[in-house]
Each structure stands twice: as structure tokens, then as C-alpha cells.
Amino acid sequence: MQAPSVGGVMLPRGKGETVRLSRGASLTDFAEKINANPASLVQVMLNLGEMVTATQSVPDETLLLLGEEMNYVVQIVSPEEEDRELLESFDIEFGEDEGDDQAMLPRPPVVTVMGHVDHGKTRLLDAIRKTNVIEGEAGGITQHIGAYQAATEVNDQERKLTFIDTPGHEAFTAMRARGAKSTDIAILVVAANDGVMPQTVEALNHAKAAEVPIVVAVNKIDVEGADPTKVRGQLTEYGLVAEEYGGDTMFVDISAKQGENIDSLLEAVVLTADAALDLRANPEQDAQGLAIEAHLDRGRGAVATVLVQRGTLRVGDTMVVGDAYGRVRAMLDDKGEQIKEAGPATPVLVLGLTNVPGAGDNFLVVDEDRTARQIAEKRAARERNAAFAKRTRRVSLEDLDKVLKAGQVQQLNLIIKGDASGSVEALESSLMQLDVGEEVDLRILHRGVGAVTETDIDLATGSDAIVIGFNVRAEGRATQMADREGVDVRYYSVIYKVIEEIEAALKGMLKPEYEEIELGTAEIREIFRSSKLGNIAGVLIRSGEVRRNTKARLLRDGKVVAENLNIEGLRRFKDDVTEIREGFEGGINLGSYNDIKIDDTIATYEMREKPRS
Ligand code: GDP
């Protein structure tokens, strides 16, 4: 049979078969699935009026359109689905309890504390920990492992509750974004002297979207001017009506600082859980659950706090957590005591993993080490592929010469962001005077004062532009976005250097050099003054991870205010740590540098030799 032609290109046309493609697949991935030449798919897209390279990750619509054009039914598979299928291929089902109704026993609720910054989330978690944590055998001091269990008496019965000890909806949302349901109930903390604030509403919306019942803790009632009634009134506008007003949300007035009414709050949480949820799990099966927090410990290797959601986790079990695996060498509870087993809704610190999993990764116990290794390796490979597929080759200064020779671009597009309008203009006019020869056009698509933003990266992505940051850095998620989209963002602080490099690139003579790799950013939320160490920044890690002894710079409103700083000290709660990940809070000491302000960003980076492309 002769292959029919689509849009003038000969193609093995489908017969309406279903082709399954991962989200973010490229035309090459598609071609592989149907045994076609990637170039022919590029051609089909061209005929459809879209220019797509073979290895570039394309949106769902493009894959669907292409499928339709060639008579295939394209099914886009999400990463979660893909993972489910991977586990199915090992005959493992994740997320459902095994056994019938009788196998299911009541379990404690898992609670997250959310609310506006400074309304007392951390203080509340500390207050509960102090007064309600179940006494350990040795009466041990509680350890911060990312979650802990507390207990309270309700109707003469001791009831346990599990608290996720990383306040804020960032962690909650990050986990949810990965398809992980970590929380049964949310405590929404609202300071009675401040009322409903933007992050209160944000947190509330996140909890609602996740269909998690909410108990409102009206905090700081000890403060003068506290108005708990007003908080109740404000929240009715968002659909949270207090029981005493005929609604079904429990409001409890508390003072986290004075430890007042904490028991009533816990009771309200238990009662809300009893009324709204049927929290049961099978403790008898192989354990499954979620990683809540993990880090590399110098002495103990990879350690992860996991929340057992069903089954019982035991020392000696073989487990997979995300793309890490291993045999549980030891388990510690939230009091730092060694335990042998952990049942549903128990958080435990696990030692013995091969590497550090991510927060929100699922974990499961399997029968054989080999299975664990295979699942972990497949997941790691999938992540690598996805990351690779996304690194589409856009224009960078290093390969400009090659791209120009190949006739792929005739124009170098630039976006310039700088710290002051004077410098931006000076830079622009010097660049425009560059003698760039006949073949290539230098165009400045956009220039402006301020940080390199996600909008800039968007623009660069759409037009294959190179972004120049002159005495400014990227803000928010712009760096990750640029990495993902393969946009070349370059930072300079001297004009002639910009001119020199652009000129060299145009002449194809750019030397390989050291490039700066951004490691993480931290937002300063509080400043602690220590007589010994100077100012300590209380931070929330906004992206990546911050590691001790790496280089850093300080940004204020997107502008660099200090360079060449060093992360001298890094703490999480009372402990010195080597790194803190995105979504977590901690303390940073910048050595002798003390000129920090709330809302400043600490960006850390390291220099790596850029490979010649
Ligand atoms: P978070 O940002 O929501 O975690 O807030 P924190 O727990 O860090 O609390 C912010 C500030 O409010 C801290 O200085 C606390 O000591 C203070 N605070 C928290 N709860 C109370 C309270 O019930 N009464 C008073 N007076 N201050 C409180």
C-alpha cells in the first residue's frame, strides 16, 4: 500500500489508532511512537502554519492537532498517570487501601496550619507541640522533623492529631501541585488584631480547592484591640460562617502566645474531622504515604520525614520514595526516639535511602530490593528525559555563530533590563552603533528598568531573544522559567563587556567561560539581631535550595545592593543545616554583612565552567 500524503508530505498515516504521549512531548517522541521520521512531522506542522523544531517540547494542543492531521487519536498522559502506570507494571497500586471495610481502622487527622504571615502559625505549632505532644518514654525533647503528633481529650477519649510542621500554604500547594494529598484538615489562623488579609484569602482558597475542611483559629486575642467578632464577620464573605451564626465552620478564639484555648482548638479539629470525614486506613498492609521533608545529613546520609498514610512501616522494609530507594535502616519519631514501626498518620524520620527525595514524593514499601531499584531508576530516567526535552535549543550567544551560518536566524533579538534608565539607554545606543555586518540584524525588542521578570522570559521565548540584565537579576520564577525554556539570560555590570560579548558572538568568536548557576533564592521575612553573629535573616526559601558556604548577593526591589556575600550560617529552627529547600523556612547569616531589610531577597549561586557547545 502506498503511504498517503498529508499536506504534501508522505507519511505513514494512522488508522485512528490511539497514541499515548507524555505531557510536554516533542515531535521526535511522537515520531518514535508511530515509526515515522521526525523531519516529516516538522514539515506537517510547517504546512499547518507552525514552526516547531523536532526536539522542542510542544503544548498539548499541538500534539492533538498533529494527531488529528495524521489520523491518530492522541492521548496526553500526565506525569501522575504515567507514574500510576509504572507502578501498575509492577502490580502495585498506590493510593488506595487494600482490603474490605473491616480492615479499615480509624486514624488521626493530618492537619496543616495556614494563614497570613505574622498571624501566628509558627507560634501556634510551637504551642501545640509544647503542651500536647504525647510524652515519650524517656520524656524526650521534641525534634523538628517536619511533622509531629499531638493528643487531646475529646469526650473522655484520648485523640491523636498529626500536624504538618511547615506552616504556610506554599508547602501545601507545592505538594498538591504534585498530586499529593497531604492534609485532611486545615487550621486557618487569623490574627484578631489584624483581620482577614490577602494571604488569609489565598490560604482559604487553596484549602477549598483541595476540598479540605477548615477550622478557624482566631489568634492573638490577648492583644489590645483584638476583635474576634470582626474576623467572623469578614470570613462570612468567603463562605466561612461560624457555628454560632448558623454556619458549619468552627471558630476558636486563642492566644498562641499565652497558650490559651489550644485544647479547644484541637477539640474543634477532631470534631470537624469526625463530622466531615471518615478517616480510616488499613494498618495491616505494606506502608504507603508521602515524603514531607528530606535533606542530606553529613553523618547519616539521606534522611527523609515521611507520613505513613496506610499500612505500617517497619525497620528493615524496602521502600521507594520518589526516585530514592533503600532499606529502612532506622526510624526516629518526632521525639527523636528510635521506633520499630509506624502506622497510619504517623510521621517518621527514615534513614537508609540512596538519595534525597523531594517533598511531596510518594513512598511505598515493596517486597524486593530489585523492584524498589527499578521503580526508582525508571522515575529518575523519566525526570531526566522530561528535563532534557524541555531544554529546547533557543539562541544563545555561544551558538549564535552556528545558527547564523545555518541560516536559521538573520536577526539577533535582545531584551535589555537595567538598574537605571540612564544605563539602559546608554547600553542600547552603544549596541545600536555596533557594526554587525550585512547578514544580521540586531534588534532590541524591549528595554526597561527593573528586574528580569517572567514576562521578559515569556517575550524572549516567543521571539528567540537573549535577555541582558545590567546590574539587575531575575526575580521570582524567572530563572527557572528561563532554564526550562532554554532562554539565554546574561548578567553584566560593565557596558563595554556587553558590547564586547555581543560583538564577539556575532563574529563567532565567543570564548567559553565561567557561567553562573543560580542555586536558590530566599525571601527575608524577619530579622533577628544576635549580639554574637550580627543580623540573622529569617527567610522563606522561594526557589531552588540555599546551601551553606555558597556565594550570594542581596537584592532589594529587584536591584543588586550587595555582591560577593557568603552564606556563612544556615539554620533550620535550632539546628545548623547544610541546605534548605524551596518552601521551607530558616535562618541565614551573611557573616559580617548586616545591612539587610525585610522583603530583601538573598540569591545564591555558584560558578561553573560553561561547556563549549
Ligand atoms: P507566622 O508568620 O504566621 O508563622 O507568625 P509567627 O508565629 O511567627 O508569629 C508572628 C508574631 O506574632 C511573633 O512575634 C509571635 O510571637 C506573635 N504572636 C503569635 N501569636 C500570638 C498571640 O497569640 N498573641 C500575641 N500577643 N502575639 C502572638
Image (cartoon, helix red, strand yellow):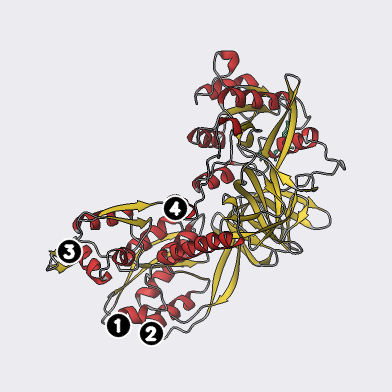
Mark 2 lies on residue: 508
* Mark 2 → mark 3, Cα distance in angstroms: 33 Å
Instruction: Give 481 or 36, whichever is nearer the viewer.
Output: 36
Q: At label 1, which amino acid type do we have? A: Lys
Q: Nearer the viewer, residue 481 or 227?
A: 481
Marks 4 and 1, how far apart at CA: 45 Å
Which is nearer the N-term, disc 2 or disc 3? 3
- Give residue 269's quadrant in the image: top right
In the picture, which quadrant includes the N terminus? Answer: bottom left
Amino acid beneath label 4:
Glu
Contact between marks 2 and 4 (CB within 8 A): the answer is no
Q: Report whether residue 562 is seen.
A: yes
**What SS does tag 1 mark?**
helix
User: Which residue does the numbered mark 1 point to in the structure image?
Assistant: 405
Point out which mark residue 85 bears. 4
Q: CA distance from mark 2 to mark 1?
A: 10 Å
Mark identifier at residue 47? 3
Front tag of 2 and 3: 3
Residue type of the residue flagged with mark 2: Gly
- Ligand 1 closer than 8 Å to the CB at disc 2? no
- Circle 1 crowding by C-alpha within 10 Å: few under 14, some 14–19, many from 20: few
Q: Quadrant of residue 464?
A: bottom left
**How far is disc 4 from disc 3 in space, using C-alphas?**
35 Å
- Image coords of residue 326 (percent x, y): 65, 60
Query: Could you say whether the residue bearing mark 3 is in a helix, strand or loop?
Result: helix
Answer with mark 4 or mark 3, whichever residue precedes in sequence.
3
Q: Earlier in the sequence, mark 2 or mark 1?
A: 1
Q: Is residue 405 above or below residue 30?
A: below
